[in-house]
């Protein structure tokens, strides 16, 4: 049955092509001729058409993704041969274009399936070799008032030469790191300027790998799991909140008295001028009425604070921290 249908379809398209050939050159429909050629020469197209026919869920969305994929696939390879000196000998090397470097922000055409990353996104180049067509990138998003940072999604601040264009700080999606073809690259600069991460932003991403992929304990883990009848009091609230999902290199607890403990901690790449780890401190004060569930809710309300229809992000954060302070004992 299928062979008969295929034969009849080819015959019909052949007749249509013959009719088209009699028309003036500018009246031809190139897509139909191409379709005719592919039906007759490429069995894979038949399978693709049959697969598309059977798609019922999110059909239009799937077709858009296929279109995005093919728009990248049709981009020709861009390879140069350059001469370089190696140990006094001139050798030829293949270099793939466009040329990008680690820490550079580019714009990428993603066309993943289902819940995979889709559409155009900014992404950070993380691993690249000049003689390889594939590169490894980390997708990014815009930081918004309702963003909830976690181990896998965190803010690295404004990226130079990009922030002035987007007016938004950059969220790194460390769990979506992926390898792509250079053919997917849509832009390597923005308004004539290249966007690069700073050294500190690269270090923050390394922290993200340790926390999410290696599962090293973060400051949030330490606060949540230790002295469950105490609550944290911060000297610099903004700084401490920025530390929450970074992995701890070293930590030390000191007992001040029955109601107070002092946590001293350091990170992998925060060092002073003498190349020594910078130490940070957080004081913990005993709760008036110890309760594990209440304690967790108080901490999470502060750490995962976000704007709502009634309050700004800063107002929500301030209110959450006031609740923590009100739940602890008064100490001298």
Image (spheres, rainbow, N blue to C red):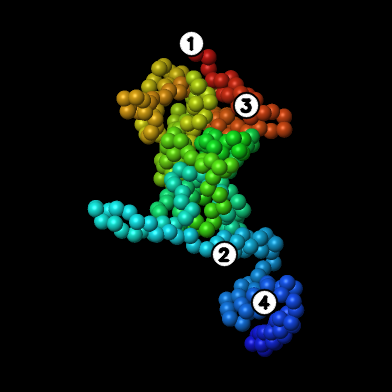
Q: Could you tell me if the residues under marks 4 and 3 are in contact, i.e. CB atoms within 8 Å? A: no
Q: Secondary structure at mark 1?
A: loop
Crowdedness near tag 1: few (<14), some (14–19) or many (≥20) residues, C-alpha within 10 Å: few
Alpha-carbon distance for marks 2 and 1? 71 Å
Q: Position of residue 263 (x, y in %)?
A: 41, 25
Foreground residue, 248 or 86? Answer: 86
- The residue to which callout 1 is attached is 332
Q: Which mark is residue 74?
A: 2
Q: Position of residue 242 (x, y in %)?
A: 50, 31
Q: CA distance from mark 4 to mark 3?
A: 61 Å
Residue corresponding to mark 3: 314
**Residue at point 60%, 75% (across, down):** 45
Q: Earlier in the sequence, mark 2 or mark 1?
A: 2
C-alpha gap between disc 3 and disc 2: 48 Å
Position of residue 331 in the picture relative to residue 118 (left or right): left
Q: Earlier in the sequence, mark 3 or mark 2?
A: 2
């Amino acid at each position: 049955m299928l062979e008969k249908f295929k034969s009849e379809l080819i015959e019909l398209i052949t007749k249509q092509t013959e009719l088209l050939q009699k028309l003036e050159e500018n009246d031809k429909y190139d897509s139909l001729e191409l379709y005719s050629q592919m039906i007759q020469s490429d069995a894979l197209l038949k399978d693709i058409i049959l697969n598309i026919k059977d798609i019922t869920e999110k059909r239009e969305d799937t077709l858009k993704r296929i279109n995005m994929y093919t728009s990248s696939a049709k981009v020709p390879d861009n390879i140069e041969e350059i001469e370089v000196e190696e140990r006094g000998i001139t050798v030829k090397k293949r270099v793939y274009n466009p040329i990008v470097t680690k820490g550079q922000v580019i714009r990428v055409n993603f066309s993943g399936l289902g819940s995979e990353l889709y559409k155009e996104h900014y992404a950070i180049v993380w691993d690249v070799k000049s003689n390889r067509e594939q590169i490894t990138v980390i997708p990014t998003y815009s930081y918004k008032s309702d963003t909830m940072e976690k181990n896998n999604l965190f803010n690295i601040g404004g990226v130079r030469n990009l922030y002035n264009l987007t007016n938004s700080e950059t969220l790194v999606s460390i769990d979506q790191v992926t390898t792509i073809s250079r053919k997917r690259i849509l832009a390597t600069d923005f308004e004539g300027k290249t966007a690069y991460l700073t050294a500190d932003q690269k270090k923050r991403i390394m922290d993200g790998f340790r926390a999410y992929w290696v599962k090293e304990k973060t400051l949030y883990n330490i606060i949540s799991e230790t002295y469950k009848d105490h609550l944290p009091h911060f000297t610099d609230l903004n700084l401490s909140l920025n530390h929450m999902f970074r992995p701890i290199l070293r930590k030390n607890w000191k007992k001040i008295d029955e109601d107070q403990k002092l946590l001293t901690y350091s990170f992998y790449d925060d060092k002073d001028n003498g190349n020594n780890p910078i130490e940070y401190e957080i004081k913990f004060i005993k709760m008036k009425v110890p309760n594990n569930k209440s304690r967790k809710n108080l901490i999470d309300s502060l750490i995962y604070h976000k704007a709502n229809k009634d309050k700004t992000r800063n107002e929500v954060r301030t209110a959450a921290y006031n609740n923590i302070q009100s739940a602890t004992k008064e100490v001298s």
